[in-house]
Amino acid sequence: MVKVGLIGLGFMGYTHYQIYKKNRRAKVVAIGDYNRDKLEGDWSSVGGNLGDMAREKEDLSGIKTYANPLDMLGDPNVDVVDICLPTDLHHDMAIQALKSGKHVFSEKPMARNFKEAQEIAKAAGRAKGFYMVGHCIRFWPEYEVAKQIVDSGKYGRVEEVFLRRVANPPTYGDKNWFMNATRSGGGELDLHIHDADYALYLLGKPKRVWAWGSKGPSGGIDVVHAGLEYPRNVHVNIIGGWAYHAPFPFNMEFCIRCEKATLHYDMQEGKPLTIYTAAGKVIVPKVPAGTGWERELDYFLKCVEKNEKPTVVTAQSSLESVRLIDAEMRSIAAGKAVDYR
């Protein structure tokens, strides 16, 4: 059984905690947070854009607590450090955790900027333990199956991809940190990066990047329209952001047009992943159970159990996702497309 130390008890920290409780591979043995009320089990303030949130006091009997999460890194009973802190704290915590010899799972994005992400990647390359970033869309059932279908070549090559991820402003963060772009990076780095990462996972690095963005409630770029240009006239269009007025619902959607079929999924529409073939057939493929959060954590736990380095998400692939966001930011600032490769 893998012994987990969880750092940060906000939306994702709470979500991870509940997942670990149900996973036979894991046991949470330590938690750390700068908010002492949360260390006493009071998670009533936790909110989020998906899933049920804590409303009752959590029983933390038998779990060691750390008011200074850095102190957890010296705990010999902890195998894995799971970092669910605000984005601007990822860099220092990840590097210190890697230096301590622990396996490290860090929530996305990898870091607040490309330079910090590079430093983490270097530390991960030297570390004894494994390192993985929570790019959960690579594990989200519908997205995972779509990737498998594309890779199989059954419907020919990809010709066009549309990705959309939108929400109202996430004001549920501790001290409203999401709404401080200096800390979160705004909707572009925090939310839009999911689809930027999936585009890289699906098709690799683009030739050129064009992006338009507008500032929103965080003070940073909170709405992004991005275009990625690939060889053979293949294009990816991404719309993402969190400037939509509450109670506008969170939604994620993709449409992948191949030579012989179109794959479509829209969460709010309530329909399953559907394939519309050139021959006129409508196919609903079977997808795995669970959320991307459950599946990514189980994957990482398996890697630790088997002593096998993660390959679905690597330090380099997570670094590349931050690099793509950096390219989009440069395109927005310049008002023109930028070369990527």
Image: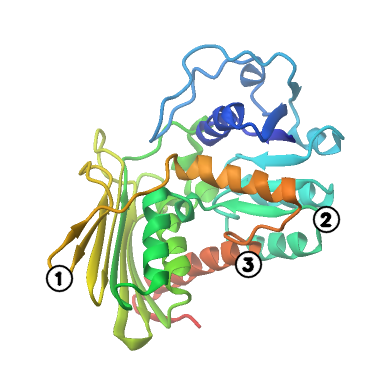
Q: Which residue is mark 3?
A: 316
Structural distance between the alpha carbons of marks 1 and 3 = 40 Å
Q: Nearer the viewer, residue 310 or 50?
A: 310
As drawn, the label of residue 279 is 1
Q: Using the rendered view, name the quadrant where residue 89 is placed.
A: top right
Q: Using the rendered view, name the quadrant where residue 334 is placed.
A: bottom left
Tell me if residue 294 comes above or below residue 201 in the rendering: above
Residue type beneath disc 1: Ala
Q: Which residue is mark 2?
A: 128
Structural distance between the alpha carbons of marks 3 and 2 = 17 Å
Instruction: Identify the residue at horizontal 60%, vertical 53% (top origin).
Output: 133
Q: Is there a contact, CB below 8 Å, between mark 3 and mark 2? A: no
Structural distance between the alpha carbons of marks 2 and 1 = 52 Å
Task: Give the mark, 2 or 1, whose residue is nearer the N terminus.
Answer: 2
Residue type beneath disc 3: Gln
Dot 2 alpha-carbon crowd within 10 angstroms: few under 14, some 14 to 19, many 20 or more: some
- Between circles 2 and 1, the one closer to the viewer is 1
Instruction: Identify the residue at horizontal 25%, vertical 39% (top origin).
Output: 245
Dot 1 alpha-carbon crowd within 10 angstroms: few under 14, some 14 to 19, many 20 or more: few
Q: Nearer the viewer, residue 285 or 10?
A: 285
Task: Give the mark, 1 or 3, whose residue is nearer the N terminus.
Answer: 1
Tell me if residue 313 comes above or below residue 234 in the rendering: above
Task: Give the mark, 3 or 2, whose residue is nearer the N terminus.
Answer: 2
